Image (cartoon, rainbow, N blue to C red):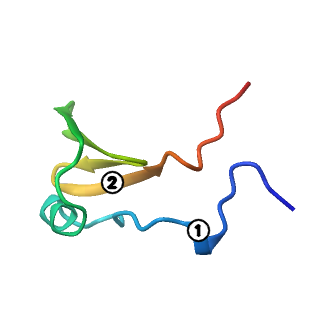
Amino acid sequence: MTIPGHVPVAEKQMMPKRGISMDEVLGEFGEPDERYGPVGEPPITEWVYGSFRVYFEHHLVLHTIDLNTIVMPE
């Protein structure tokens, strides 16, 4: 059975975990393809890697989005 937007655990890619630093992300995943920000207060920065995006508050990971699991409305 296939569930839309669901990726089996064995197929999930490794992504940065919440709370790690920008330096740790760089060390583990290398340079991002693109960088945006920081913008706003607190400062939010976005780094784009091939199939995922990482959002930082100040210098720590706030959230990571796996672009392979996003289901867009029709």
Quarter placement of the N terminus? bottom right
Residue furthest right in the image: 1
Question: How many numbered tags mark residues here?
Answer: 2
In this view, the residue farthest toward the top is: 74
- Taking the spot 28% from the left edge, 57% from the top edge, the residue there is 61
Q: Residue at x 16, y 54 (%)?
A: 59
Q: Secondary structure at mark 2?
A: strand
Expressed as whole percent of the image width and height from the top left, the position of residue 6 reads 69, 57
* Residue 44 image point, x, y percent: 24, 40
Q: Earlier in the sequence, mark 1 or mark 2?
A: 1
Residue at the image point whose x is 33% and y is 54% from the top: 62
Report the residue at 42% width, 68% height from top.
Answer: 14
Residue type at mark 2?
Leu
Task: Specify the quadrant of the image occupied by residue 37.
Answer: top left
Residue extending furthest bottom? Answer: 10
Q: Position of residue 24 (x, y in %)?
A: 17, 68
In what quadrant of the picture does the C terminus appear? top right
Q: Measuring from the top left, give residue 57's x and y in whole percent.
A: 24, 48
Q: Secondary structure at mark 1?
A: helix
Taking 69 as reference, is 61 left or right? left
Residue assigned mark 2: 62
Residue 11: image tag = 1
Query: Which circle, 1 or 2, is nearer the viewer?
Result: 1
The three-letter code of the residue at mark 1 reads Glu
